[in-house]
Image (spheres, rainbow, N blue to C red):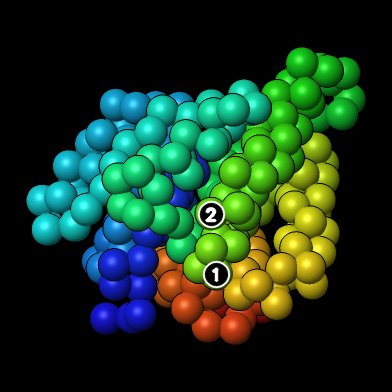
Amino acid sequence: MSNLKDRVVAVLGAQDEPGTSVALALAREGAVLVLGGQDRHRLEALQREVEAHDGQAAVVGVHPAKRHHPSRLVETATDAFGGLDALVFAVEARASSLSSGDLDSWERALEAGLKGFLYAISAAIPAMRKRGGRIVSLNKAAPDPITAASQEARGVILRELARELSPEGIKTGEITVEEGAASEEVVREVISLLTDEKRGFSIRPTGQG
């Protein structure tokens, strides 16, 4: 078991892959989970699976694009479990092609993937300043330029956060999961990033360069 035992980890976007697999793996490592997302039914099913294996988890309904929703994750972590040690941001909203001219789709993708990320880290950082922590962006390989732009922006923000906050014990990283990558490999690298000094990865299917 890694040194994640009894660490409090919030996973935003836990109702979808790869967030679900990551949450289950963290629970197996002994982490205490705060599961956030829009589909409460699926989150509660995930919570039951964690608790069936003697893990601990709380569920919080979160719409990442609503400014005050991500703060509920941190409030729950603090009130129920005494603090927050890590945030895994696994939210992704796909956008229509640029040629579609679908501005509504573009805005939804940016609001969830970029504004939601900003809201989440704004809530998490004050809690982590008391104890150190990790902030990780878990990215699916982007099939559209709007999603890719959100992911690139998150990477820029994470690198700057690392520069500013590393003296306070807060480290950051990102993982890009290529289509077809094995979930076991993804969760292994997430755990390494949460526990070690590693900064980020691009996870591809076995056999690809």
Q: CA distance from mark 1 to mark 2?
A: 9 Å
The residue under label 2 is 127
Q: Secondary structure at mark 1?
A: loop
The residue under label 1 is 132
Q: As rendered, which of 152 and 84 lies closer to the eye?
A: 84
**Residue 140: image location, x then y, percent:** 60, 51
Where residue 143 is drawn, which disc sits there?
none
**Residue 147: image location, x then y, percent:** 74, 41
Residue shown at the point (82%, 45%) measured from the top left: 149
Q: Amino acid at mark 2?
A: Ala
Q: Quadrant of the C terminus?
A: bottom right
Residue shown at the point (49%, 61%) measured from the top left: 86
Question: How would you rate the neighbour count of disc 2 (Cα within 10 Å): few for under 14, some for 14-19, many for 20 or more?
Answer: some
**Relative side of 65 to 32, left or right:** right
**Residue 174: image location, x then y, percent:** 64, 64
Residue shown at the point (35%, 73%) measured from the top left: 4
